[in-house]
Image: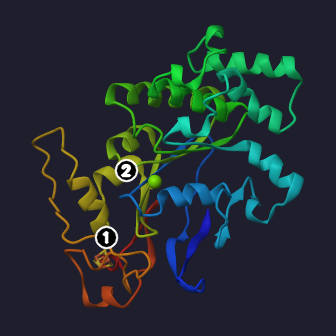
């Protein structure tokens, strides 16, 4: 992902554009094959918008997504449909993407039908295979979505995303609505499927412990900017950006002998319609310097794969 931008126009009552919400601003990162990239941040920071824009479910404002070397933003027609099969999405609420009046078998076969894959018999075979992959049996084929619990529906949502043999799945808060005990089942299933099918995930979430558990690499977003990214253990053991530090200091440390700096942020996240000048975090940062108010910090690479966007390290 290179310099991704997504801006939403804000209309006045008279219909003219009075400004733009800069939901995603020059965001760049890499997702390696067979790995998970976790994207964290508070709600409204642009992480879900990033996930959706990458898949072109939202029209990008700028930037590139190079998928196996090809910029998918410039693909059209058949070439785009081809790539679209390989890039899938799992939502927080899988129920919203299922037709309550249709049986599960149909829900799983629908992507194949849309992409004109296989005859009726092959599609049924594939649906049964998918049910088996996510821990269900043949008898679930004829059931309706409402007959499943939240965790079961998320497994079905995953099965549906797998129907077309994708390479990358964007998982947008896939376990946030589930009980903790059910969360780990879904996470374990995601990991098993990743190993078996060499899947890559973009895992969007606000729960840091879940992200730490599943991700190889983590990016931290604030007000549409990717302020820090690093290999997972490095980010958690040596966070650099003051915002990352504040997020981590809100998570209890299991070992009481490990002392961690406590940073409590004051104030609210500013409106993305009027983002602060200079560093987007300067209105809440306990370390703010004069230059932070006017100069946008450049991205600095501090170690392999570890980048931070903050004047303290320049
Ligand atoms: Fe804080 Fe300045 Fe760093 Fe922004 S650039 S995070 S305001 S120290
Ligand atoms: Mg979201």
**Residue at point 33% right, 25% down?**
181
* Mark 1 lies on residue: 269
**Quarter of image, res 107:** top right
Q: Residues within 10 Å of mark 2 (few under 14, many from 20)?
A: some
Give the mark nearer the N terminus: 2 vs 1.
2
Residue 300 lies left or right of residue 103; in this view the side is: left
Q: Residue at horizontal 43%, vertical 56%?
A: 230
Labelled disc at residue 206: 2
Say which of 39 and 101 sits in front. 101
User: Does mark 2's beta carbon lie closer than 8 Å to ligand 2?
Assistant: yes
20 on left or right of 60: left
| 303 vs 26, nearest the viewer | 26
Q: Residue at x 57, y 86 (%)?
A: 14
Relative horizontal placement of residue 124, taking residue 244 as reference (left or right): right
Q: Which mark is residue 247?
A: none
Q: Nearer the viewer, residue 48 or 97?
A: 97
């Amino acid at each position: 992902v290179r310099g991704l931008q997504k801006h939403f126009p804000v209309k006045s009552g008279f219909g003219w554009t009075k400004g733009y919400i800069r939901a995603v601003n020059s965001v760049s990162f890499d997702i390696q094959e067979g790995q998970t990239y976790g994207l964290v941040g508070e709600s409204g920071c642009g992480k879900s918008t990033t996930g959706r824009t990458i898949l072109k479910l939202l029209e990008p404002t700028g930037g590139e997504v190079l998928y196996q070397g090809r910029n998918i933003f410039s693909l059209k027609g058949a070439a785009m449909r081809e790539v679209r099969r390989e890039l899938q999405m799992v939502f927080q609420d899988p129920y919203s993407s299922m037709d309550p009046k249709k049986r599960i078998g149909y829900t799983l076969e629908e992507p194949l039908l849309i992409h004109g894959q296989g005859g009726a018999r092959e599609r049924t075979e594939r649906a049964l295979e998918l049910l088996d992959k996510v821990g269900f049996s043949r008898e679930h084929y004829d059931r309706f979505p409402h007959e499943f619990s939240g965790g079961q529906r998320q497994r079905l949502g995953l099965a549906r995303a797998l129907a077309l043999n994708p390479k990358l799945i964007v998982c947008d808060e896939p376990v946030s609505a589930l009980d903790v005990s059910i969360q780990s089942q879904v996470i374990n299933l995601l990991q098993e499927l990743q190993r078996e099918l060499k899947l890559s995930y973009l895992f969007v979430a606000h729960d840091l412990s879940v992200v730490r558990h599943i991700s190889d690499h983590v990016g931290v977003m604030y007000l549409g900017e990717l302020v820090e990214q690093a290999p997972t253990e490095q980010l958690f053991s040596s966070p650099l950006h003051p915002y990352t530090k504040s997020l981590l200091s809100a998570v209890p440390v299991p070992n009481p002998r490990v002392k961690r700096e406590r940073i409590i942020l004051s104030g609210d996240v500013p409106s993305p319609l009027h983002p602060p000048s200079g560093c987007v975090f300067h209105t809440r940062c306990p370390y703010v310097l004069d230059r932070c108010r006017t100069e946008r910090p450049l991205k600095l690479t501090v170690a392999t794969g570890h980048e931070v966007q903050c004047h303290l390290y320049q």
